[in-house]
Amino acid sequence: MTAMLLDTFGRAATDMRVSLTDKCNLRCTYCMPAEGLPWLPAPELLTDDEIVRLVTVAASMGVTTVRLTGGEPLIRPGLPGLVERLASLVELSLTTNGLGLTKLAQPLADAGLRRVNVSLDTLRPERFLSLTRRDRFDDVIAGLAAATAAGLSPVKVNTVLMRGVNDDEAGDLLAWCLDHGYELRFIEQMPLDPQHGWDRSTMVAADEILEMLSGRHELTPCERGTAPAEVWLVDGGPARVGVVGSVTRPFCGTCDRIRLTADGQLRTCLFAREESDLRAPLRAGATDAELAVRMQVAVRGKKAGHGIDDPDFLQPDRPMSAIGG
């Protein structure tokens, strides 16, 4: 292994989020407008070979886990083949809206995928339609079951609570996940919408979520480590629930993540306004050593924190779907 990917605060990047596409087959209200967004032109997207090469370089410097994201990663053509190649390099997981899992869960598991996180913000079909602008609730439920059947365990469910929209379902979502053997993760709504309409007052904060859950369950905190989620045993375990409090309970001090966008830009933080272009030098014939240096320089520039509480905080130009969730 060559030199680690270290920043100036002593944090080593060992986890990489790799976006496979900026496109999605849902139109969640907090993520993109009803008509969608201007998608990246196909020639700008990294090819499978380019993704594998960049992950190979990152793995040589200490990256041990990769999470595939989007947009919606399951819509990328030939995904099982790419997963098989990446799974030989790193431990591999994937975040998805779940729509394609009935067809792809088993092929992906066979290719070496370890786990999936499935986004689901409501248990009410009519509310799902309102939130996602697509009548696909039953497909997500079937996808979750398919992931379990394929052995992608533990299957995790990601939920964003929004005040006055679905915050009345926190307890019901946890009960449902406990009944089905899924591990629920509540995620604070973050300022990453393309409309730049995020309003902190509409965000349901981690403390509020925990108060909602504690009214129905005994929660025992688990050791956190470097994971983005704080996790609690539910009623003594073994079932667990997590809360990702990126805004009100940030974990920047132990962050070990970097991000590769679908068009080959390296980001050191989800909220960063700067990116390092890896696609251009890659296509211009850069060696692995030269690419490694570019990654090292980018990581050394990582800031101490995301700065959301800073009065001068500016939301990234790219929305979540283009960065990679």
Image (spheres, rainbow, N blue to C red):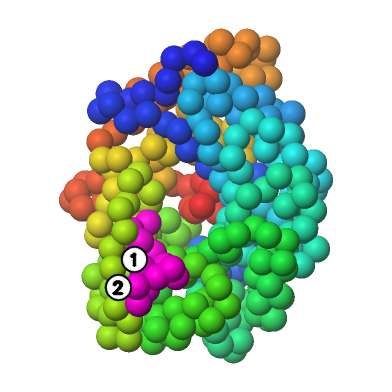
Observer-nearest residue: 76 or 92? 92
List x then y, in percent, for residue 202: 31, 74
Instruction: Give me the disc on residue 232.
Output: 1
Instruction: Please provide the residue range marked out in magenta.
Output: 229-242
Q: Is residue 251 above or below residue 143?
A: above
Q: How many marks?
A: 2
How many C-alpha atoms fall within 10 Å of the one at disc 1: few (<14), some, or many (≥20)? Answer: many
Examine the rendered structure and indicate whether residue 308 appears above or below residue 7. Answer: below
* Of residues 90 and 181, the one drawn nearer to the viewer in this rendering: 181
Residue 212 lies, in percent from the top left, at 30, 81
Label 2 and label 1: CA atoms lie apart by 6 Å
**Of helix, strand and loop, which one carries label 2?**
strand
Q: Is residue 248 visible?
A: yes
Residue placed under numbered mark 2 in the picture: 219
Q: Amino acid at mark 2?
A: Leu
Q: Are marks 2 and 1 in contact (CB under 8 Å)?
A: yes
Is any part of residue 22 visible from this angle? no
> In screen coordinates, is 178 left or right of 68?
left
Residue 129 appears in which quarter of the rendering? bottom right
Q: Is residue 81 left or right of residue 67?
A: right
Q: Earlier in the sequence, mark 2 or mark 1?
A: 2
SS for callout 1 = strand
